[in-house]
Amino acid sequence: MKYRKLGDSDITVSEIAFGSWLTTSGGVEKQTAIACIHRALDRGITLIDTANIYGRGIAETVLGEALAGLPRDSYVLATKLYFPMTDTDRGLSRAQVRKQIDASLARLKVDHVDLYQCHRYDSDTPLEETMEALSEVVRSGKARTLGFSEWPADRISATLALPGVEKFVSSQPQYSLLHRTPEEQVIPLCARSGISQIVWSPLGQGVLTGKYAPGAAVPSDSRAANDVMNTAFRRQWLEPPVLEAVQALRPLAAQAGLTLAQFAIAWVLREANVAAAIIGASRPDQIDENIAASGRDVPPGLFAEAERIIARVV
């Protein structure tokens, strides 16, 4: 496992991060989920990402159980807030920031998180109020650093211009060979501003593993077939032209000595502004395959050809 610096912070994270959205929020049986977490830690993953909304607290609770008794400095723990936890609890107001950080810490059974992230931008709350509240969280010792997920570039810029507040060190966008939008504005802005990317869905919701074959039925054990785990699944990525393009990447991955999934993760990690790529798992052995993408030296020409193939269909 290789490690990278997280923005302008003093935190170093594993290139592969463990994401708890599907694994610990109810999509996987709890003991299997805990086994996945322990396998991730055993294999050198240090960054564990979660959110209060995952299972409405279930993911954080399971993580708290899995991490209990482990040295606090042996892992980097990140969580988020924004989405509705109740009919009245949502957003990034000062009151919500104060309430949700305490609730997350209680579920996680820790006294601080290493990274506290805004899950989305809250247009109903003044940006100054949000950043002042988040700064209070850091200065009280309940979080070491701050981040955001899926914020537009203009809002990132507005935050950077605010005086007297703690600065963001991470951005969490969706980013993969199938979804390259962050390259347009967010990655260049963050690279100039000391903000790293922690990428979610580097495997394109599993499509870039090659498990979905053109013209074949969706595998019964796949995310796309699981009603608990296929929320917001991009069905257009299951269209034959996309799946055929993904299959055309196999020879390129083979030339690099990688599986298709490893090749897709290594492509994400080729970007210097990416600190980590988040993976999920429904079985511990899936972690073993994905972490092998860390530190791989892939000829740039193979990545360039992969980009040309995918660009024709997305």
Image (cartoon, rainbow, N blue to C red):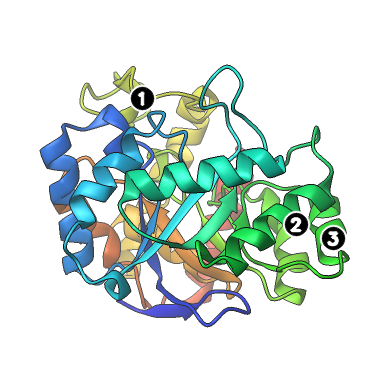
Judged from the image, the secondary structure of the residue bearing numbered disc 3 is helix
Task: Using a 10 Å C-alpha cutoff, classify the residue at mark 3 as few (fewer than 14 neighbours), some (14 to 19) or many (20 or more).
Answer: some
Q: Nearer the viewer, residue 95 or 43?
A: 95
Q: Position of residue 148 (x, y in %)?
A: 63, 53
Sequence-wise, the earlier of marks 3 and 1 is 3
Q: Residue at x 80, y 32 (%)?
A: 124
Residue at label 1?
224
Residue 62 in view in this figure = yes
Please state which of the two labelled residues, at mark 3 or mark 1, is closer to the viewer: 3
The residue that label 3 is drawn on is 157
Which label was assigned to residue 132?
2
Amino acid under disc 2: Glu
Does residue 190 appear left or right of residue 21 in this picture?
right
Spatial separation of the CA atoms under disc 2 and disc 3: 16 Å
Q: Earlier in the sequence, mark 2 or mark 3?
A: 2
Q: Nearer the viewer, residue 203 or 276?
A: 276
